[in-house]
Amino acid sequence: MSDLTATQREKMIVDLRQVVSDAEDLLKMTADEVGEAAVSLRERLQDRLSEARHRLLTLQSAVTDNARAAGRAADDYVHDHPWQAVAIGAGVGVLIGMLISRR
């Protein structure tokens, strides 16, 4: 899972949240169903939902930690090399300005 990009991780989080939400809706709709098979299915689904919530929180925490670490690294770099950071920012600004003016 470590070789996923940040965008892929965030999409996975959104998708997993949707699956959990859909499964919760399904559980609510089938609450009236009786029978051993229905009860067993609901119990298994609730267990898997709990596990999915736990994994979602773990994944979300990992993404947040990575973003914070990247922010700290950028902050440290800017403090250690302020003139290079200004030059890089100016260069990016010029490139964006040129791209916008071409339209």
Image: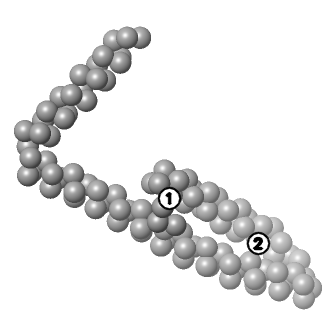
Per the image, the residue denoted by label 2 is 27
Task: Tell me if residue 36 can be seen.
Answer: yes
Task: Tell me where residue 77 appears, x and y as whole percent.
Answer: 15, 51
Instruction: Reply above or below: 24 against 99.
Output: below
- Left or right? Give the position of 38 relative to 18: right
Label 2 or label 1, whichever comes before in sequence order: 1
Q: Which mark is residue 4?
A: 1
Q: Which mark is residue 20?
A: none
Task: Tell me where residue 96 appears, x and y as whole percent.
Answer: 31, 23
Residue nearer the viewer, 61 or 36: 61
Task: Tell me if residue 10 can be seen.
Answer: no
Task: Tell me where residue 79 appears, x and y as whole percent.
Answer: 9, 51
SS for dot 2: helix
- Left or right? Give the position of 47 relative to 41: left
Dot 1 amino acid type: Leu
User: What is the number of callouts on the image?
Assistant: 2
